[in-house]
Every structure is written in C-alpha cells, then in structure tokens.
Image: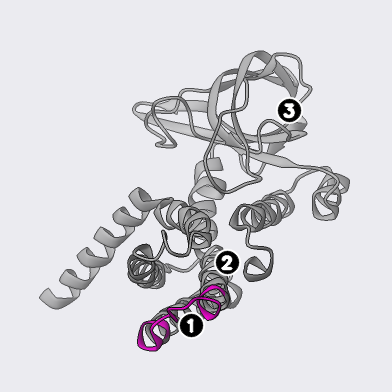
Amino acid sequence: MTRHHHSLGLTMTWIGQLLKSHFLRILGNHDPAYIEAILNGDSLCALAISEPNVGAHPKHLSCNAVKQGESYVLNGEKAFVSHGPYADRFIVLAITEQTQARKHFSAFLVPANSTGLQRMPPQPVKGLQPSSHCNIVFTDCHIPAATLIGTAGQAFEEISLPMRTLEDSLMLAPIAGAMQAQLDYLAHASSASSKPFERNKMGVLLSLTESAKELGIIAASKLDQHEGIPDLTPLIIGFRSLVGQAQTMLFEFHDEYPGLRELAGDIQILNNIGRQATAARTASLCDRFLAEQRK
C-alpha cells in the first residue's frame, strides 16, 4: 500500500483508525454504529493521552475525570493529539482515582462538540502528511457516564500499553513499503542518469529492504497467533537496525536523487517513535537473559 501511494502518513492514519475501532469493540463501546462509521471512513477518531511537557508517562499525567451522579466532569489538557483538528470524537484517558502514589486511569469516548471541550489551533508538523495535531483543553466538561470505555481505572493497561506495541508492530511493514518505494524511485531515476547506480549497493539495499519486509510480516502474523499481545521487542529492534543501515546508505544520494529525501524523513520519524518505551522493553529483555544465564 505505502509502496504505491508513497504516503506513510496516510497508511499510519488508516492503521490508527483500525486500532481505535478495535479497542472500542473489544472494550464494550455502546455505540456500534460509530465503529462502523470509522471503518467506512465517515468518522475520524483521535486518541488523547499525552499532556503538555510530560508526554504520556502515567506518573506525570494530570487530566482528571470526577464522577458526579450519572456523569463525569473532565478537566485538564491533552497535547499533540493526532488528527485532533478534524476528529469528531476523542478517546480520552483521564485519572478517575488515585491511591497513594498510583494514578488509576479510565477512558472515555468524548464527542468533539462537548461543552467545555476546546480545540487549540493546529500545530505545524513536518512530515507524515496528512496527519495533523493539536492540543485539546477540558474545562468542566460534563460527559455521560455511558461514555466510559472498558474497565474503570484500567485504561492505561487496557489501551495505552497495548496501543504502543500494536502501533510499533503494525507499522513495520508500511515502513518497509516506503523503503521499497525509495528503491523503485532510485531504479527509475538512475536508469535515466549518465551514471547508473552501483549494482552491488542496490543489491545490498534490496536485501535489507526484503529482510525488513519479512520482519514486518512476521510481527503481524505473531499478533494474529496470540490472544494477548506478545513481546515483539526483538523483531522491532532488528527491524529498526535494518532500516537504519539502509537509510545511512541512501543518505549520500539525497542530493543526486532528491526524491529519496521526503520518504526518508517520514521513515526516520516513524523509526524513532516510541524509542523510549522500546528502550525499556530492551532493558527488560536483557534482564531476563542475564537472569537465565545465572540459573
């Protein structure tokens, strides 16, 4: 798909909408017609987790929802909400309970036209078009209790954590598709040049790209084979290494073949997304390996 339309941002948007409809379905959303509207492309849903200056780290989030009778009152601000400027509903994670130092989050499906919800101006972002971002502010935003998604107090475990792994895993194959698009362009452009591209380098790039594509397919198939979400850290890390090698090789040709540059920018953005979470999983992988060696 990405290989043919050359837009990682479009593919990311499509996968993101599929994932949101997936979570709405498995977590017992009460509006199946809205899920159908997302899948038909008639509605756009946005996920609001991150907050200004703190990102998505649960210890630092402060947006809260206080229950009042048959409704909740939302207060706080969400930052860098993907598709926020045009979404008609938001999946919002907010604190509904706090015990000692631990915050418990719940998720709500909030209509964009809710009283007390304000969209801030869109934020200019380079790359990944047509993705768009903005902050949203909640000021005494009253929402019905029926907008609750999933288990109260468990939204971080039910949505945020699995979403990161699913996005990381399902975007591997599209990134490989963008790499294939780069090589398609390079083959056409170099054939018209007086200086054909070196065959050995092209062979290495084809090998790296094909290996990346296979890792993307394997990651997706492993998700299909498990009821839960498996730890795909080794595949993700291996994939990113292959992508890094290929983009390093291609970098020296950006001036000679400028069509490589735009796709390279999008590839780099996606290859770097979630690196902090991946680093934590990598450290855990190391700890398990060392523990096994000590047995």
Residue under label 3: 145
Sequence-first disc among 1 and 2: 2
Residue under label 1: 210
**Quarter where residue 220 is shown:** bottom right
Q: Is residue 217 magenta?
A: no
Checking the image for residue 130, the label placed there is none
Residue under label 2: 174
Label 3 crowd (10 A; few <14 / some 14-19 / many >=20): some
Disc 1 to disc 2, C-alpha distance:
12 Å
**Quarter where residue 170 is shown:** bottom right
Q: Is residue 85 above or below residue 158?
A: above
Residues rendered magenta in the picture? 189-202
Query: Which residue type carries mark 2?
Result: Pro
Is residue 295 visible in the rendered image? The answer is no
Name the element at disc 1. Answer: helix
**Image quarter hosting the N terminus:** bottom right
Q: Residue at x 36, y 56 (%)?
A: 278
Q: Residue 286: where, in percent of width, then height?
A: 22, 66
